[in-house]
């Protein structure tokens, strides 16, 4: 389906529908919050029953998510030792390779056993599909890194990570998408990096994105799309097929795992419908994790956990932050949106609509590490994190555009339109309301209790029920604390054990952190959209402690 994925340049009924759908998420969030406040005052007995039912649902869902969090972490841990380069060579001769694997004795090690089983299943599915991949020697990687104010100390670790990874850098084209309005210092840093690394890759380009191109906003997607179009000309000149190119759009601070590109290449090759797929690694925020305040550390560990849970349901998974996709698919959808802030999720929806629902995200169990947003002090760090989470929550701008497409599309099945539309709306409304209801509203029925309520059975059993439910929730907290300790990078310097102990106690702040730095920014973004106060792209400030 060809569709103008934008809220701009639409007229008549489409414009009215777009505006109504922009109002809907914020309206529902406020109705839920205000409705529960009013109900707690007017009918505290009913409100208490509703809150008990809500808390029970929340805890059951939390436990459900914790089960899949553990499973996803185990998969990530199992695949750490995988020989991706060897597997790529095997897929090049998939028939004989599959027979060889079937004859191998089953490994005694649990991780090796399950990794081999997963690998064999993927090979079997590929052979059954008949959709064999191009040879690995014909596959190229394009890495686009948008830059506007990131200096060399932010950009270079990622470039070095690509160069020193296990995948041959001679098959990687690096393109730094440099905003023309970047400072002289940033421009000089980018050119210095190019001079140092140009010969380490297939090629290394710096593409300057002019300011004030008609129809573009000052957003990352416009810069990345301009660079991708330049790369398209580059591939055309060298007669490199788009189907054989995998494009990764990385934030300037992204440092890929040494296995990233070999793992990505393997998953691209092993996936039957590889062109119509995105490939999502697990984001972690380890670059500066021990140099930021506790609230900054906890909120971004939570983001990694959320993506681990999402990876267990690839049929409903949407791309987030640094990810990869087929360059042919990127060309087919006419690149990233040039007038939207949330380009990382918007590109998934553009492709999903373009291919009439035949588009999915493939989770790849390796990591990319990024910076936690920081500032010069705690106060500035707090403000910067709030702005970043509000920008992420501005992904709600996709909802009205996607719903308009769903209402027009006959190629996307009704079931897909219904389930994806509901998931999209429910995700944003839950993001803005759950923490507020649990933290601030759950105790109001008792506060506003009338005499009649005070003598009711609910009045006496409600605190006990809530205490039991929150005891179950504490089990989920223990799982999160345990996994966070296992996933964290080593601590450098003195007092390592004390820092880990302190990190355990940091998790006790999670209700307040999620409320202030997740729910409120989400409600802020939805309210702005509801009233038509459209946001501008805010470039995340990044600071690194020297040494």
Image (tube, grey):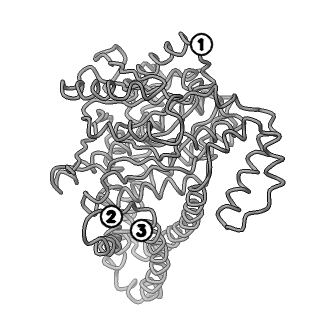
Residue at 35% in and 36% down: 252
Measured along the vertical axis of the image, is residue 275 above or below residue 164? above
Residue 209 visible in the picture: yes
In this view, the mark in front (3 or 1):
1
Residue 87: x %, y % from top left: 67, 44
Q: CA distance from mark 2 to mark 3?
A: 11 Å
Residue 203: x and y in percent read 45, 22
Identify the mark nearer the N-term, 3 or 1. Answer: 1
Q: Which type of secondary structure does the marked residue at label 1 adopt?
A: loop
- For the residues marked 3 and 1, what is the alpha-carbon distance in whole angstroms? 48 Å
Q: How many marks?
A: 3
Q: Label 3, on which residue?
A: 485
Asked if one can make out residue 50 in the rendered structure from this viewpoint, the answer is: no
Q: Residue at x 50, y 28 (%)?
A: 142
Q: Residues within 10 Å of mark 1 (few under 14, many from 20)?
A: few
Q: Which is more N-terminal, label 2 or label 1?
A: 1
**Image position of 542 (left or right of 6):** left
Residue 457 marker: none
Residue hosting label 2: 491
The residue lying toward the viewer, choosing from 83 and 369, is 83
Residue under circle 1? Answer: 239
**Residue 127 figure quarter:** top right
Dot 2 or dot 3, earlier in sequence: 3
Asked if labels 2 and 1 touch by Cβ distance under 8 angstroms, the answer is: no
In this view, the mark in front (2 or 3): 2
The residue that appears at 44% across and 72% down in the rendered structure is 477
Label 2 CA crowd tier, 10 Å (few <14, some 14–19, many 20+): few
**Quick one: label 3, few (<14), some, or many (20+) residues within 10 Å?**
some
Rendered position, 378 above or below 192: below
At 40% from the left edge and 72% from the top edge, which residue is drawn? 43
List x then y, in percent, for residue 32. Answer: 42, 57
């Amino acid at each position: 389906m060809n569709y103008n994925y934008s809220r701009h340049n639409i007229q008549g009924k489409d414009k009215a529908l777009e505006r109504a759908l922009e109002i809907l998420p914020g309206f529902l969030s406020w109705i839920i919050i205000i409705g529960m406040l009013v109900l707690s005052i007017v009918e505290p007995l009913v409100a208490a029953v509703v809150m008990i039912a809500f808390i029970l649902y929340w805890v059951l869902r939390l436990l459900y998510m914790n089960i899949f969090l553990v499973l996803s972490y185990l998969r990530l841990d199992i695949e750490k030792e995988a020989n991706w380069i060897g597997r790529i060579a095997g897929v090049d001769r998939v028939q004989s390779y599959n027979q060889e694997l079937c004859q191998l004795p089953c490994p005694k090690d649990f991780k090796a056993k399950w990794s081999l089983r997963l690998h064999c299943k993927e090979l079997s599915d590929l052979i059954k599909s008949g959709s064999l991949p191009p040879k690995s020697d014909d596959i190229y990687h394009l890495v686009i890194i948008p830059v506007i104010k990131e200096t060399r100390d932010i950009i270079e670790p990622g470039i070095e990570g690509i160069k020193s990874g296990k995948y041959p850098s001679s098959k990687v084209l690096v393109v730094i998408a440099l905003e023309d309005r970047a400072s002289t210092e940033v421009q000089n840093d980018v050119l210095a990096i190019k001079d140092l690394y140009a010969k380490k890759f297939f090629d290394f380009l710096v593409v300057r994105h002019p300011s004030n191109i008609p129809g573009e906003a000052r957003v990352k997607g416009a810069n990345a799309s301009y660079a991708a179009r330049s790369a398209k000309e580059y591939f055309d000149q060298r007669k490199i097929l788009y189907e054989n190119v995998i494009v990764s759009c990385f934030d300037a601070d992204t440092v890929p795992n040494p296995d990233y590109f070999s793992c990505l290449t393997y998953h691209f090759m092993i996936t039957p419908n590889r062109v119509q797929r995105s490939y999502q690694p697990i984001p972690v925020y380890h670059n500066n994790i021990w140099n930021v305040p506790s609230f900054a550390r906890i909120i971004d560990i939570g983001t990694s956990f959320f993506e681990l849970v999402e990876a267990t349901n690839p049929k409903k998974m949407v791309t987030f932050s640094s990810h990869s996709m087929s360059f042919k698919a990127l060309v087919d959808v006419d690149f990233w949106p040039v007038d939207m802030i949330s380009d990382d999720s918007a590109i998934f929806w553009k492709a999903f609509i373009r291919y009439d629902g035949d588009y999915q995200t493939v989770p790849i169990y390796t990591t990319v590490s990024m910076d936690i947003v920081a500032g010069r002090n705690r106060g500035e760090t707090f403000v910067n994190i709030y702005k970043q989470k509000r920008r992420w929550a501005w992904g709600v701008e996709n909802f009205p555009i996607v719903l308009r497409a769903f209402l027009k599309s006959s190629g996307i099945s009704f079931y897909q339109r219904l389930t994806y539309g509901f998931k999209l709306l429910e995700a944003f409304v839950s993001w803005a309301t759950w923490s507020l209801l649990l933290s601030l509203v759950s105790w109001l029925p008792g506060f506003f209790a009338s005499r009649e309520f005070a003598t009711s059975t609910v009045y006496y059993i409600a605190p006990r029920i809530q205490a039991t439910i929150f005891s179950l929730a504490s089990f989920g907290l223990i799982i999160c604390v345990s996994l966070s300790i296992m996933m964290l990078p080593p601590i450098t310097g003195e007092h390592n054990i004390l820092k880990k102990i302190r990190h355990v106690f940091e998790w006790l702040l999670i209700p307040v952190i999620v409320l202030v730095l997740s729910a409120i920014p989400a409600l802020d973004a939805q309210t702005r959209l509801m009233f038509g106060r459209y946001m501008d792209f805010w470039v995340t400030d990044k600071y690194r402690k020297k040494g």
